[in-house]
Amino acid sequence: MTKANEQEARVWQLLKENKIKQAIATCHQLNRQHPDLASGWHAASHLALKTNRPNVALRAIERAISLDPDHTDWLLQKALCFRQLGQTEQLDSLLQTLLTRKSLNAYHCSSLALLLTHLEKREQAIQFYQRAAKLKPGESQHHYNIAVLQRSLGETDAAGRNFDKAIRLSPKNYEAYKVRSELRTQTPEKNHVKALEKLLKKGIGDQKGKAQICYALAKELEDLGDWKQAFDYLKLGADTRRSYMQYNPQRDLVMIATIRNTYTSGLFDGRTQGDDNDEAIFILGMPRTGTTLVERILSSHSEVFSAGELGNFAVQMMGQVKAQGNYQSSSRDELVALTAGLDFRQLGEDYINSTRPFTGHTPKFIDKLPLNYLYTGLIHLALPNAKIINLKRHPIDTCYAMYKQLFVDGYPFSYELEELGHYFAAYHCLMEHWHGVMPEIIYTVVYEDLVADIEGESRRLIDFCGLGWQEQCLKYYESEDASITASAVQVRKPVYMSSVDKWRQYETQLAPLIAVLEQAGIPLD
C-alpha cells in the first residue's frame, strides 16, 4: 500500500469513528500532497457533504471526475451533491446515466434508491432497494427502507412483511417496531403488545428507542381499548422524548407574539406588490387536524398536484433576509421585523421558482406544510392570488392527536401537556389575528364538519380554490399518490368519525392541558 493509500484509508477510518475534524485535517493533507489522486477528492467531497457544505463537496467531486471521468462512485457522489443543493434538473439528468450502469453494488443501489425517492419516483426506488437487499441480504436497513416506501404507497401488507424482516435482522431497530404498529388497527387476535412489553421490560439503553417502543405500545393498546394502560405508556414515551430535547418553549411563544405585533393591519392596506402567480394552494394549521385529508381531496382533482410539505417558503424568506447583510447579528424579534420589509414580489417569484420542476405542470399545486401558519401574512403579501386553507379541529382533540404522535422532526412543544397547551393557545391567537388583518383571505375547514359531510364540504373547498367539481375528489382514498405524513395509512380509507372526541377517553389524564386551554380562553364546547 502506498503512502497516499494509507492516508486515504486513515481518512475513512477517522470518519467511521466520527472523528470529523481529524478526518478533514488528514484529507486536506492528502489532497495537498497528492492532488492527482481522484479518490482523495472523492473523500474530501464526502466529508464536505457530511458537514453540510454542499458547494465545497461539489467542487471536490468535480475535481475527482476531471481526473477519472467515468467512475460510478464519483458520479453518484455528484448526484448526492445535486440533491443537497436542490439542483433537481441536474440530479434527474445525471440519474439517467447512473441507472443504466452495470455491476452496481449494494451501496450504489441504496444511494440511487434514496435519490429516486427524492425525485418522487417511489416505485423505481423500491426496485433499487430490493436490488440492494439481494446484494446484502443481512442488512436490516434495506428492508426498513422498502417498508417505508411501501407504506407511503398504501401497500401495507407488503410493508408489514418487510418491517418484520428488518426487525428480525436488527432487533434494536426500534423505529421499525413503531411504524409497524401504525400500519393497521391491532386486534385481540393479532397484535404485538406482549412482545413490545417484553422488549421494554428487558431494558432499552437508547432513550430514543425507548420512546419509540412506548409509542408503539400506546398505539396498539388504544386500538384494543385499554385506555388507561395506553396513556400510561404514552406519557412514559412523551416524557422520555422530552428528556433528551433541548427546547425552550418560551422562545416560540415570544416569537409568535412578535409576529402578531409586527404584521399589523397597516401592513396589508393597499398592498398589491406581490407576485401575481395563482398556482399555490397553502394548507396549514396544527398537525393532525385533517391537513392530509384535505390535501388528498384536492389533489384528486385533475388540475391539482400535491407537492407535499415544502419548506421552500421559509427558505426563500431567510435567503432574502440573509441577503440584507445583517442576519448574523439579528435576534429572532429583529428577524421578524426584517421579514416585514422584504421585496414581496421577489419573494413570491423566488418561492414559485424554487418549487420547479415538481410544479408547473398543472394549474394548481399544494404546499401542505402545517407550520406555514407562522408566515400566513407574508405568504399573502408575496402571493396575493394564492389560496390559503386553515384546518381547524376541536382544541383538545388536536392537542391529544399531536401528543400521541412521535414526530421524526419538529413540533418539540408536543411532548409535555402544559407546553402543548400554551403553544396551541399562541397558535389560536395568531390565526385569529390573521383573520382580523386579512379578512376573507383564509378559508377555514372544520375537521368535524368535513368528516360529517364529506361531499358538501369538499364541494365548497373545490369552489374556493376556483376549480370545477370532479367526482373523483370524493374517492381520494383510491389515489395511488404517495403519502409520507403521519396520516399515510388513514388517508387510504374512506372518511370515518372514530377520531372525533377521542380525547374524552383521557379527560382525567389530560387535565393539565385542559386547564391551560381554559385559562387562555380557548372555546372548548
Image: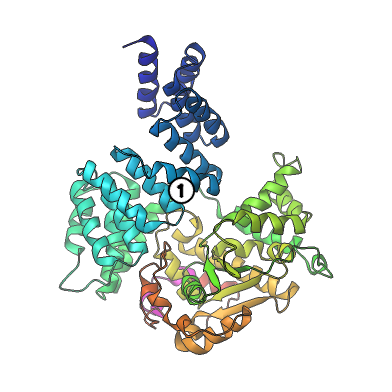
Q: Main secondary structure of the magenta part?
A: helix
Judge left or right: residue 160 versus residue 402: left
Is 79 drawn above or below residue 164 in the view shown?
above
Residue 448: image x %, image y %? 48, 83
Front residue of 521/51: it is 51
> What amino acid does circle 1 point to?
Met
Can you give x and y, in whole percent of width and height, for residue 453 in the image? 48, 89
Q: Is residue 173 visible?
A: no
The segment highlighted magenta reads 501-514
The residue carrying mark 1 is 245
Q: Nearer the viewer, residue 273 or 304?
A: 304
Q: Count how many numbered circles sit on residues in the image.
A: 1
In front of the other: 521 or 142: 142
Query: Does the stretch in magenta take in 506?
Result: yes
Identify the residue at image location x=33%, y=63%.
151
In the image, is residue 299 above or below residue 357? Answer: below
Residue 153 visible in the snapshot: yes
> Where on the picture, by quarter, is residue 523?
bottom right
Quadrant where the N terminus lies?
top left
Q: Residue at x 57, y 81 (%)?
A: 462
Q: Badge 1: how crowded within 10 Å, few (<14), some, or many (20+)?
A: few
Q: Would you identify the image quadrant in which residue 341 lies? A: bottom right
Residue that appears at 80% across and 65% down: 267
